[in-house]
């Protein structure tokens, strides 16, 4: 998995106001839909919320990887945001989340989905990588930091 295959500068937002888990997921859905017109923001938001109802995608260390399958998705799509103030995300370590990396996969991508999710989680488990994402002060700096995944 290569981060540059998942995100674009248009789907990378640094230092945004999240407010709540629901608002952060809505922001991710809107960010992706603005960059990819075939994806409906409302449908994507509902899918992300539905996935969260199955169990939190907060993986610890202030990281969440909201993910779902999506119609009109021909390959794996990602979006990355960092939040000004961490939010409660019901993460497995009970820590608030300030880095969210959303991932969408095609409806029929079963093994690809799991492999990409595992690789992304492994990269985000690296403390130096997380710190570089948190140190970014602009959308472009965050995008460049994200591309430097271990």
Image (cartoon, rainbow, N blue to C red):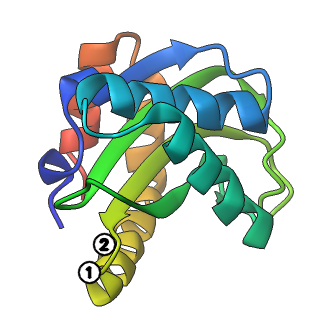
Residue 55 visible? The answer is no
Q: Nearer the viewer, mark 1 or mark 2?
A: 1
Q: Where is residue 150, by image quadrant?
A: bottom left
Q: Where is residue 118, by image quadrant?
A: bottom left
Q: Nearer the viewer, residue 93 or 54?
A: 54
Residue at the spot x=61%, y=24% of the render?
A: 83
Identify the mark at residue 112; answer none if there is no mark: 1
Residue at numbered disc 2: 116
Residue 66 visible? The answer is yes
* 103 w.r.t. 139: above or below: below
Task: Say which element carries label 2.
Answer: helix
CB-based contact (under 8 Å), mark 1 and mark 2: yes
Apparent side of residue 150 relative to residue 46 in the rendered image (left or right):
left
Q: Position of residue 35 (x, y in %)?
A: 25, 26
Q: Nearer the viewer, residue 149 or 27?
A: 27
* Crowding near the residue tagged with mark 2, few <14, some 14–19, many ≥20 C-alpha atoms within 10 Å: some
Give the residue at the far bottom of this rendering.
111
Task: Say which element carries label 1.
Answer: helix
* Crowding near the residue tagged with mark 1, few <14, some 14–19, many ≥20 C-alpha atoms within 10 Å: some
Apparent side of residue 148 relative to residue 99 in the rendered image (left or right):
left
Residue at the spot x=44%, y=57% of the render?
A: 124
In space, the residues marked 1 and 2 are separated at their CA atoms by 6 Å
Q: Nearer the viewer, residue 17 or 42?
A: 42
Residue at the spot x=21%, y=24% of the render?
A: 9
Q: Position of residue 61 (x, y in %)?
A: 65, 54
* 49 w.r.t. 132: above or below: below
Q: Position of residue 104 (x, y in %)?
A: 37, 57
């Amino acid at each position: 998995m290569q981060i540059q295959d998942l995100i674009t500068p248009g789907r990378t937002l640094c230092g945004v106001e999240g407010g709540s888990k629901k608002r952060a997921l809505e922001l991710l859905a809107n960010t992706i839909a603005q960059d990819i017109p075939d994806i409906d923001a409302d449908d994507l938001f509902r899918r992300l919320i539905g996935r969260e109802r199955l169990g939190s995608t907060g993986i610890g260390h202030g990281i969440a990887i909201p993910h779902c399958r999506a119609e009109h998705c021909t390959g794996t799509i990602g979006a990355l945001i960092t939040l000004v103030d961490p939010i409660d995300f019901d993460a497995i370590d009970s820590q608030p989340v300030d880095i969210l990396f959303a991932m969408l996969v095609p409806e029929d991508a079963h093994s690809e989905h799991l492999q990409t999710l595992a690789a992304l989680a492994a990269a985000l488990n690296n403390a130096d990588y997380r710190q570089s994402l948190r140190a970014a002060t602009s959308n472009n700096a965050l995008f460049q930091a994200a591309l430097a995944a271990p």
